[in-house]
Amino acid sequence: MGVARWLALYVMVIVAGNAQDADGALPAATFKAVAEANANGPYTGIVIPNLYEMGPLLSSSSYNATGIIDFAGRRFRFGTVEDRKVILVMTGRSVINAAITTQLLLSFFDVEGVVHYGIAGNANPALGIGDVAIPEYWAHTGLWHWQRYGHDPEDELALESNGDYTREIGPLKFANYTINVTGCPSFDNLLNSIWYQPEEVFPVTGTPEERQHDFWVPVDSTYFALAKKLEDLKLESCVNTTTCLYYTPEVITVERGVSAGIFVDNAAYRSFIYGTFNASPVDMESASVALICYQQNTPFIAIRALSDLAGGGSAKSNEAGTFRDLAAGNAVAVVVEFIKQLSSGM
């Protein structure tokens, strides 16, 4: 590990904090464990939202556990997947947990790339439950400028002239989703419209405090090329002996996925984000992991297995609870094969 990375690690240790120490520093034993772990690196980081998604990997014959380091409320699990050194870490649900955990992973450990996986809702009517979608781009769709009622799309947003906000993405006009209106040639909605906003990004390769704006964050091009090689992988179609899909799920590389701190179970919104963004998987974490890796100049990819068509819509659109475990298992199968390809192709 280079001097600059050791210095960054030291600073993070001092400021990250731990409730057990009055001076806010990590305990000496934890600091030593982190240093020893990094001496055995580098690692591929595997970032996972929840325990039910992590479980199939922990029980996989492809995973061999070698150690654990607990700090900052997170458990960093060391081991190998297909003989490649990895660190597994569970984030917890949604965008903030995912961002915090990914930043901790990259700040403290010698990580050469990040693989994120889990289940997701589906906005793409061409895909099905159990399919594993691997997008080339991710966006956080939970950052909005909510426009004042009475203002039109042609009206400038508050602080738009400062470069803080933009009308380049959107709008979602609530009046367009009004129903049961009869005998009225025109109607409106007090909620008016929202405009989606790009994130303020501060890359490690840039100048501190000089922001740039990014909405679509690309995954690593080499990782995405490897993912394309997985499209013939055979996946499971049955939850048990009595509950099966009528088709065999597939691995599909797609253009875009989106994340926000919202569980989308609404067909109208699903149709909007598919029509507006051409998004396939819809989840609560991937864009956060993508943004942190992008800012930290670390290769990244997200692999999401589809557990439901968000909001329902057809006979095969069963509830997420029914096919959650099937989707989680399929995601893990793809992750294991991806890491095998990563080891042989790089």
Image: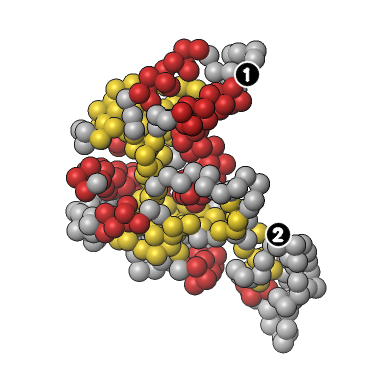
Q: Which residue is mark 1?
A: 24
Residue that appears at 78% across and 64% down: 158
Direction from residue 274 to residue 224 in the image, left or right: left
Picture residue at 59% right of the left edge, 14% below the top: 20
Q: Position of residue 82 (x, y in %)?
A: 21, 36
Task: Where is residue 236? Give x, y as percent.
Answer: 23, 50
| Residue type of the residue flagged with mark 1 | Gly
Pointer 1 local density, CA inside 10 Å: few below 14, some 14–19, many at least 20: some
Mark 1 lies on a secondary structure that is loop
SS at circle 2: loop
How far apart in space, not on screen, are marks 2 and 1 (Cα)? 35 Å
Q: Is residue 75 left or right of residue 333?
A: right
Image point (49%, 72%), residue name: 275
Hey, which quadrant is residue 333 in on the image?
A: top left
Image: 137 above or below 126: above
Q: Which residue is mark 2?
A: 164
Q: Nearer the viewer, residue 311 or 49?
A: 49
Q: Is residue 199 visible?
A: yes
Please tell me in which quadrant of the rendered image residue 172 appears. Answer: bottom right
The quadrant of the image that shows the N terminus is: top left
Of the residues shown, which amino acid type is indicated by label 2? Asp
